[in-house]
Amino acid sequence: MIHRKLRLGVLISGSGTNLQAVIDASESGALDADVAVVISNHEGARGLVRAKEHGIDGVHIDRGAFATAREYNEKIRDILRDHVCDYVVMAGYMRLLGKPVLDFFPNKVINLHPALLPSFPGASGIRDAWDYGAKCTGITVHFANEVFDDGPIIAQQPVMVAPDDTIETLEAKIHAAEHDLLPAVLQLIAENRVEIIGRKVRILPA
């Protein structure tokens, strides 16, 4: 029987450092998956260049070119489908995915958030935790649904806020943690070790 690696569609909006972490893990053999396509809502996203550098299809989809959010999401879905993606990974994708994608990939859309959900949801999780004076923040990888940062949590990793941290050093620590946790969670999925039970996620033993 021929082994087939998991095929990932990665959605980005910017530099794509988490995309790079996934690509590196895939190429090193640490992740039993391949990035099949990268989709960005920003034409100048550095992540599209990263995709090209590794021979991966990179696609820019302009939300402004579509009359409705549904049509925009249908375009994303069609590209993911055409690339035979098994899972969708939102790695710094700063838009809410709609039903056309979520319904086509039920419980197969993964989001990465730079805080310990349910604390500090939204686009400015790092800054919000910093401004609040949190002594511990972190990162969350979860299944996505139609509400921002609301789906079942797969894994979390705390990041302590040191007395001498600045917002810049805290961001660097959180991004470093993201680069480790996201590929690790995707490997658990590739090994069929992630089980959803209601709002809870169980990690099955190896």
Image (cartoon, rainbow, N blue to C red):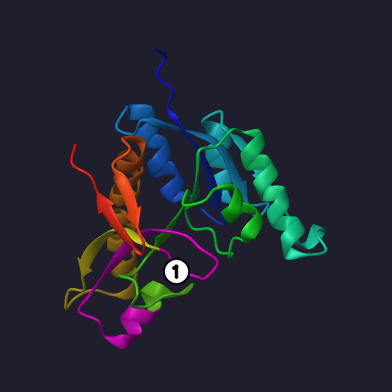
Query: Is residue 41 within the magenta segment?
Result: no
Disc 1 target residue: 149
Q: Position of residue 53 (x, y in %)?
A: 54, 32
| Quadrant in which residue 66 is drawn | bottom right
On screen, residue 138 versus residue 80, left or right, reads: left
Q: Which of 11 and 101 lies nearest the eye of the viewer?
A: 101
> Is residue 61 in view from this perspective?
no
Taking the image as shown, residue 185 lies to the left or right of residue 146, namely left
Image-based side of 5 in relation to 146, left or right: left
Q: Position of residue 136 (x, y in %)?
A: 21, 74
The residue that appears at 22% across and 65% down in the rendered structure is 158
In the orientation shown, which residue stands out farthest toward the front?
A: 198
Residue 160 higher or lower than 4, as above or below? below
Residue at 35% across / 41% down in the picture?
189
* Placement of 100 over or under 116, stated as above or below: above
Residue 46 screen position, x and y as percent: 56, 49
Quarter of the image with the C terminus is top left
Dot 1 falls on a residue whose secondary structure is: loop
Q: Number of labelled discs?
A: 1
**Chain part drawn in magenta:** 128-151
Q: Quick check: is 129 in the magenta stretch?
A: yes
- The residue at the point 28 percent across, 48 percent down is 180
Front in this rendered view, residue 184 or 98: 98
Residue 75 pos. (x, y %): 72, 49
Three-letter code for the amino acid on which mark 1 is drawn: Asp
User: Which residue appears at 47% of the width and 48% of the height?
Assistant: 108
